Image (spheres, helix red, strand yellow):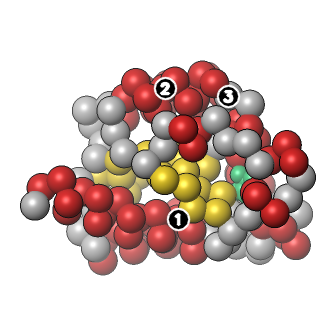
Amino acid sequence: HTILVLNGPNLNLLGTRQPEVYGRETLAMVEQRCVEHGQSIGLSVNCEQSNHEGALLDALHGARGVYGGVILNAGAYTHTSIALMDAIFSIELPVVEVHLSNIHAREDFRHRSYLARAALGQICGFGTQGYIMALDALRAHLDKDTA
Ligand code: DQA
């Protein structure tokens, strides 16, 4: 299986963006760790990032039938985008929603995730380790399907 790790708006700034909230690891470092951890559990990993909602929609549509699953940190679109929720419902792939921060412990407007309705599950509050946890979750999910 190949997994798409898809990051949304402002996550290209990881490492320098509010490091007290999001840490000092850059997106390139996180993506590299995802590739390496994927290898260690038998998953190929491709990574994409966009600041544009439409580009994220296109990436999700393109994942259908190509990838075995998606790890998605949609940034602030999480809290606003019915379109991204609909895309997740449409592509018939397991999607794990990831947030670096614990969105439920932050401002009220971050508590609602439209994506959570469509996602397999949500991992938040564990920093960049959340992406690794999401890979493990997808591995277990995919194994369950073929068992
Ligand atoms: C985030 C949480 C969102 O509320 C925020 O808009 C982000 C990052 C996270 O990873 O913690 O851009 O998705």
Residue 81: image tag = 3
Read off the residue under disc 1.
131
The residue at the point 76 percent across, 58 percent down is: 104
Left or right of 142, for residue 98? right
Residue closer to the observer: 53 or 76: 76
Residue 36 is situated, as x and y percent measured from the top left of the image, at: 40, 73
Residue closer to the observer: 73 or 45: 73
Position of the N terminus, as image quadrant, is: bottom left
Disc 2 residue crowd, few under 14, some 14–19, many 20+, Cα 10 Å: some
Residue 88 is situated, as x and y percent measured from the top left of the image, at: 46, 32
The residue at the point 24 percent across, 57 percent down is: 142
Q: Is mark 3 within 8 Å of ligand 1?
A: no
Q: Earlier in the sequence, mark 1 or mark 2?
A: 2
Q: Earlier in the sequence, mark 1 or mark 3?
A: 3
Residue closer to the observer: 113 or 36: 113
Read off the residue under disc 2.
87
Residue 22 is situated, as x and y percent measured from the top left of the image, at: 78, 66
Instruction: Measure the C-alpha gap from mark 1 to mark 2.
Output: 21 Å
Determine the image quadrant of residue 125: bottom right
Residue 14, above or below 49: below
Left or right of 146, for residue 33? right
Q: Are marks 2 and 3 in contact (CB under 8 Å)?
A: no
| Tally of numbered tags | 3
